[in-house]
Amino acid sequence: MPFVTVKLTREGTEPGVDRTTAAQKAEIYKGISQVLFDVLGKPPEWTWVVVEEVEMEDWGWGGMPVAEYRNKLAAQGSASKKPQEDGTSN
């Protein structure tokens, strides 16, 4: 009997929504159950899926709060993707 835990940062994916919606969670349950059936042959009715939402300030990555780390990656990504005159990236 598979037991899967999915941890997500608590944040919305749509304006005005501050967390994963019930409909999104239902799709997660369905999708994970389907993958376990497709890969391992485990019937969906045997699969348990738990979604845990973690507050943004309770999640760290790369030695800093996740929001700060994301900002750092975004800044680095935009700087490294600037095309050079020969068409290549930095």
Image (cartoon, grey):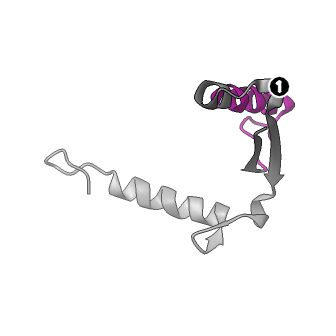
52 to 60, vertically: above or below: above
Q: How many C-alpha atoms fall within 10 Å of the one at disc 1: few (<14), some, or many (≥20)?
A: few
In the image, is residue 25 part of the stretch drawn in magenta? yes
Q: Nearer the viewer, residue 66 or 32?
A: 32
Q: Residue furthest bottom?
A: 63
Q: Residue at 78% across / 65% down in the picture?
A: 58
Name of the residue lying farthest toward the right: 22
Q: Secondary structure at mark 1?
A: helix
**Residue occupied by mark 1:** 45
Find the magenta span and give its range: 10-35
Whether residue 17 is visible, yes or no, is no
User: Where does the N terminus fall, quadrant-wise?
Assistant: top right
Measured as percent of width and height from the top left, residue 76 is found at 43, 61
Residue 18 image offset from top left, x and y in percent: 82, 44
Q: Position of residue 88 (x, y in %)?
A: 20, 48
Look at 71% across and 29% down and name the residue there.
42
Image quadrant assignment for residue 59: bottom right
